[in-house]
Image (cartoon, rainbow, N blue to C red):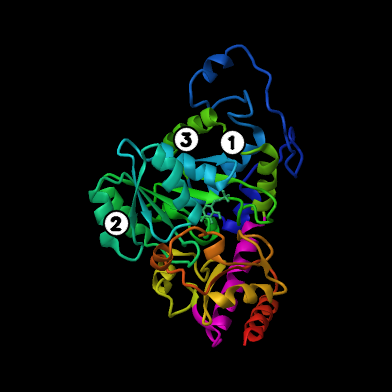
Amino acid sequence: MLDLATRCVHGGRRATPGDPDLAPPLRRATTFLQHPGTHAATDGGDFDGPLVYGRYASPNVVEVEAHVAGLEGAGACVAFGSGMAALHAALTCLVGHGRRVAVPRQVYGGTSALLARELAECGIVALTYDIEAPGTLERALAAGATLVLAEGLSNPIVRVADLPDLAQRAHAHGARLLVDSTFASPIVQRPLEHGADFVMHSATKALGGHSDLLAGLLLGSAEDMDRVRGFRKRTGAVLDPAAAWLLTRGLATLALRVRAQCAGACRVAAALAAHPGVARVHHPSLPSDPGHARAQRLLASGLYGSVVSIELAAGDAATRPFVAALHLLQDAPSLGGVESLASIPRVMSHAGWSEQELRAAGIGPGAVRLAIGIEDPGDLVADLLGALDALV
Ligand code: PLP
């Protein structure tokens, strides 16, 4: 099997004598000339044949889906207009008749909000469990959860989920495991290899990689993804061809970027762990991190993710001055881009959570999330240490 870096470059469309462009052309057409016989195929919900209409499928979307399916080792991939659209499709389509989802406490705030609002209104029940306490998942499964959601590396404190254990527990109850792999990307972890049934990405992050597109991907068996494709066709949440084209461009450098980001994150984590202004550093590269041993077992060798979260010793009052004192890391949400970002989860990704929910998820008053880009790690460390020193 070729290395992932090679598959990032060559795993998508290949030029041929009849289609010689080495860079993929952007094809924006929303409708395609039909031939006798194709109309019958479009009557069904789950169209998967010749091109008909842009809401069903279009060339750049099909291309990027095949490329990422190859990187994840999935039967098929379905692309959406954002990560949340992909999650919405997953939590609606794949939950089954039980309509109960086990959701970790350590989860992206947007996911918990979707479950608490729109999905709850549709009768889908979220049963909370703790990624660190398997007994709590057993309770959710006993209460009828048919889908278990987990973030392989959690947002924001980078907890490492024990995917083989979660998959085994879910399967023992006839439930299936859906992994939001946004923080990992296929370069750091491929959840299907660890027993997961479905993988989801906010491709807005590392897969796109340049903070200039919104996209979401859902992957699984060809059969399950056929159903999801039908859902996407009927609800209209398809990825735009221009965003798919940009995503394909980003994928070529995915391994290069993610490996550099992860190396930078390790340097940043080690440097901040030694600073008295930092009470705690969350990054599984650190031997003291609760996820360290699990990361060595479940993540690609030497890669621990590109996000580092810290807890400032001075607490809440220090978070805004610290972020404001940074010069290279910019105060913005998101992650996985070429540029490093710093954001305060309590007012950004997890705004609106109660103090109890924040504490249960390990997000302390002084929490700052650092999304490491591809800048020189020494420059980033100097920026971060300078901002910490400015606090005292
Ligand atoms: N999942 C995780 C872990 C995220 O961090 C995000 C966004 O921050 C999403 C899903 C949602 O993705 P999008 O912003 O592309 O809708």
Can you identify the residue that label 2 sits on? 137
| Residue 117 shows in the view | yes
Residue in the foreground of this view, choosing between 106 and 14: 106
Mark 3 crowdedness (10 Å alpha carbons): few <14, some 14-19, many ≥20:
many
Q: Where's the C terminus, which quadrant?
A: bottom right
Callout 3: CB less than 8 Å from ligand 1 = no
Disc assigned to residue 86: none
The structure residue drawn at horizontal position 76% and vertical position 38%, both measured from the top left corner, is 20
The structure residue drawn at horizontal position 48% and vertical position 42%, both measured from the top left corner, is 88
Disc assigned to residue 228: 3
The structure residue drawn at horizontal position 60% and vertical position 52%, both measured from the top left corner, is 7
Residue in the foreground of this view, choosing between 337 and 6: 337
Under circle 1, the secondary element is: loop
Distance CA(mark 1)–CA(mark 3): 11 Å
Q: Quadrant of residue 328?
A: bottom right
Q: Where in the figure is residue 196, as x and y percent of width and height?
A: 39, 51
Q: Earlier in the sequence, mark 1 or mark 2?
A: 2
Is most of the magenta stretch helix, strand or loop? helix
Say what amino acid the circle numbered 1 marks. Answer: Val
Say what amino acid the circle numbered 3 marks. Answer: Val
Instruction: Tell me if residue 76 is in the magenta stretch.
Output: no
Contact (Cβ within 8 Å) of mark 1 with mark 3? no
Can you identify the residue that label 1 sits on? 238
The structure residue drawn at horizontal position 65% and vertical position 38%, both measured from the top left corner, is 240
Q: Which residues are magenta?
A: 253-280
Callout 1: CB less than 8 Å from ligand 1 = no
